[in-house]
Image (cartoon, rainbow, N blue to C red):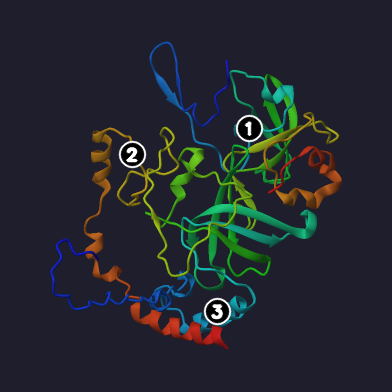
Amino acid sequence: FALAPPKLLRSVSHSFLSYASTTGVCRAIQKLTRVRVVDNSALGNTPYHRPPKCIHVYNKTGVGKVGDKILLAIKGEKKKALIVGHKMPGPTMTPRFDSNNVVLIEDNGNPIGTRIKTPIPYILRQREGEFSKVLAIARIFV
Amino acid sequence: RCRASGDGKPEKFQPPPKPVIIDKQKQRAERRFLSPEFIPPRGRTDPLKYYMERKDMIQRRKVLNIPEFYVGHVLAVTTADPYANNKSNRFVGICIQRGGRGLGATFVLRNVIEDQGVEICYELYSPRIQAIEVLKLEKRLDDNLMYLRDALPEYSTFDVNMKPVSRLDHEEIPVNKLQVRMKPKPWSKRWERPKYNIKGIKFELPESKMKAAQKWSQPWLEFDMLREYDTSKIEEKIWQEVNEGLKT
């Protein structure tokens, strides 16, 4: 079955006729935020009954912004990922996205997917050394 | 003009009525637009601060042409970006909010690119902005289009390579009375409540919900005299000041 995006999956119904509601999309990325994987990797795009969640942010503060690495729990596995856009408004002149976007990455920084369709902010080019391979597979920049 | 039955006696020659020439250029000059960031907010700050800011704003406007635009216009902004190729970055979007006063005035542009909604908050007087062009002129029914985040994405998509829609100078800016359809609830804000006073959404909620939302209405607010802020005289003075500043 197709995995509905977290925004439309607002209430979860169980067999004993009760509805549990979920929180809205988290603004910046921290532990237990549901994220959206935007590259075309198999791990990110195959449907699963649980959305990919952040379990650790590699940062002094536990809050992840654009360009931070996080640990993701997808399909029962742990995978590192790079944040490419979040819902929280950042400094002026930087784009703010409507969903928390993330690109799956290996430990050495190589992306797992081969193409990124969603727009990526230009700020990431500042750290061209670390993210050169991710920027190479990105198509649209905002 | 033909005479149905021949009269016999020739009628006096009636000259055609003279055309009334309405010089729309002069009519247009009567309509003034003062950008909202010039109007100082109500407070106890020294007006000298706002005067100095206005001088700087006029200086900046002499260099960069900031066109007249309202919320609901589709704009294309080119900014200088050290990390972009060709060092400049062009973004097209609909203006959903204009905030801030003085040099910190901002406007937020929204667009949906490849099914991803992107919003960028630009500062009007930032030196990084190289050009602002208005692609489509149309006002909407509301001052604040933040509800477009919860509306169907088709209402926020605008072609990046859109050509500017031609418009004559003297015409009034058209008001688009579009009623936007929303995604299913929950929304980021409860737009049906009277505090937001939104007229541009087609609420498909049941009548009971709309009536329940009216519980939060505050009908005494419009009669509150302490909240009144009459800006007509301030606007006159600032309009003259800005015009003189821009002429020199």
In the rendering, at what x and y percent does residue B5 appear?
14, 62
Res B130 → quadrant:
bottom right
User: What secondary structure is found at the residue carrying circle 3?
Assistant: helix
Relative to B156, A139 lies left or right: right
Q: Amino acid at mark 3?
A: Glu
1 or 2: mark nearer the eye: 2
Label number found at residue A36: 1
Q: Does residue A3 appear in this view?
A: yes
Name the residue located 86 percent from the left edge and 34 percent from the top edge: A108
* Badge 3: chain ID: B
- Residue B53 is marked as 3
Q: Amino acid at mark 1?
A: Arg
- C-alpha span from label 3 to label 2: 42 Å
Which amino acid, by three-letter code, is at mark 2?
Answer: Phe
CA distance separating discs 1 and 2: 29 Å
Q: Position of residue A9 (x, y in %)?
A: 49, 26
Q: Is residue B224 above or below residue B247?
A: above
Q: Secondary structure at mark 2?
A: loop
Depth check, front residue: A19 or A101: A101
Residue at 54% from the left image edge and 37% from the top image edge = A25
Residue found farthest to the front: B8
The chain that hosts pointer 2 is B
Instruction: Identify the residue at the far top of this view.
Output: A15
Q: Where is residue B72 shown, x and y percent of the image?
A: 46, 55
Q: Which residue is mark 2?
A: B203
